[in-house]
């Protein structure tokens, strides 16, 4: 397989639609901004706001959020930091889950739940329409996949959602979604150290590797989450050698590997540190050779 060493720095979401969205290929995921356990206000609220403003100032125009981050913390931070929003900024949110008082993550994916979540996102983000919404599947759901996704497409027809995406899905679910309507993006766990499939209790695989070719075939950007969290190999790994070669950090090489792996990958590294944000974004300047990619595997 020949890897992409001439990096395209943008990717187009819903490229065949009447309203495609072209974004820079390094976005920002907001999940790390709330307090411990993705709950409550940030430890350093001024820095959290500055991270969002700096990301946009440095060219990031794709933000990933959810109303169950915090709860509602990241949405409110985005609104406070950036509203009125730049014209080219794409804010992507997720529905299908909620949080319990014990901070647990549970399904919230009946059609009524989905509608409540969309309305809440519209309110907290101060938007009339959300440009991209992922239906985030959850373990132990009692609601059929098609029923939840169908509610998304209904709200798209109503104008509340511009584009519909999927998150934490198997290859079979992507294929099922494509039969129901236009799927704009897929957001699954993926990174250099997280290439093996993510197995659910039912034996399904919901990682990035097994859906990447399907996404590329249909022109669907793959948005990897947790690409830097618990996914980097040990310090004596191959990625460390490549990092030394390029005078870069292992995290930067991990992001560079994703960017080179496929032009359809849109990484969204998250951080609660302004310094790490700047470091992550510099990964776009790293050019990995064919030999580098072959060595990394």
Image: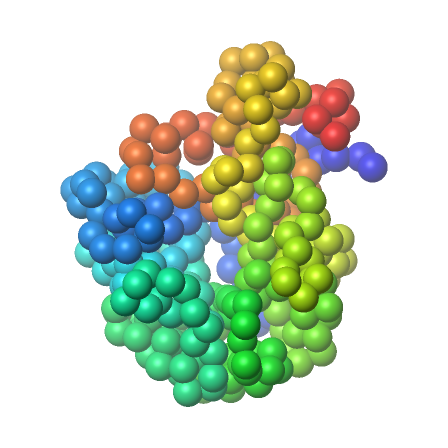
Residue 122: % across, % down: 32, 73
Can residue 79 be seen in this snapshot? no
Can residue 233 be seen in this snapshot? yes
Image: 9 above or below 88: above
Residue that protrudes farthest toward the right in the picture: 1
Query: Which residue appears at 83% of the width and 37% of the height?
Result: 1
Residue 16: % across, % down: 64, 66
Query: Which residue appears at 29% of the width and 33% of the height?
Result: 274
Query: Which residue appears at 66% of the width and 20% of the height?
Result: 238
Closer to us: 80 or 6: 80
Tell me the quarter of the image containing the C terminus.
top right
Quadrant assignment, res 140: bottom right
Closer to us: 172 or 286: 172
Residue 78: % across, % down: 27, 55
Image: 35 above or below 244: below
Closer to us: 288 or 35: 35
How many marks overall?
0
Quadrant assignment, res 91: bottom left
Image: 188 above or below 179: above
Q: Is residue 274 left or right of residue 135?
A: left
Query: Which residue appears at 35% of the width and 46% of the height?
Result: 32
Colour setup of the view: rainbow
Q: Is residue 152 left or right of residue 174?
A: left
Image: 8 above or below 141: above
């Amino acid at each position: 397989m020949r890897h992409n060493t001439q990096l395209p720095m943008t990717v187009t979401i819903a490229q065949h639609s009447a309203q495609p969205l072209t974004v820079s290929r390094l976005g920002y995921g907001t999940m790390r901004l709330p307090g411990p356990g993705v709950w409550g206000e940030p430890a350093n609220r001024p820095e959290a706001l500055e991270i969002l403003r700096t990301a946009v100032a440095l060219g990031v125009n794709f933000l990933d959020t959810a109303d169950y981050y915090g709860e509602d913390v990241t949405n409110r931070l985005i609104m406070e930091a950036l509203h009125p929003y730049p014209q080219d900024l794409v804010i992507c949110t997720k529905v299908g889950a909620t949080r319990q008082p014990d901070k647990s993550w549970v399904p919230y994916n009946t059609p009524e739940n989905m509608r409540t979540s969309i309305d809440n996102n519209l309110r907290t983000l101060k938007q009339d329409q959300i440009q991209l919404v992922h239906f985030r599947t959850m373990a132990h759901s009692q609601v059929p996949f098609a029923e939840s996704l169908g509610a998304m497409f209904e709200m798209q027809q109503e104008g509340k959602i511009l584009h519909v995406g999927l998150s934490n899905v198997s290859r079979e679910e992507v294929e099922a979604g494509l039969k129901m309507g236009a799927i704009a993006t897929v957001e699954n766990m993926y990174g250099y150290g997280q290439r093996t499939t993510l197995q659910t209790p039912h034996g399904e695989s919901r990682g990035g590797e097994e859906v990447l070719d399907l996404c590329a075939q249909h022109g669907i950007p793959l948005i990897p989450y947790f690409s830097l969290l618990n996914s980097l190999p040990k310090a004596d790994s191959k990625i460390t050698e490549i990092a030394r070669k390029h005078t870069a950090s292992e995290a930067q090489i991990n992001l560079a590997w994703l960017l080179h792996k496929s032009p359809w990958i849109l990484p969204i590294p998250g951080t609660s540190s302004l310094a790490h944000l700047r470091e992550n974004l510099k990964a776009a300047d790293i050019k990995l050779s064919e030999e580098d990619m072959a060595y990394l595997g």
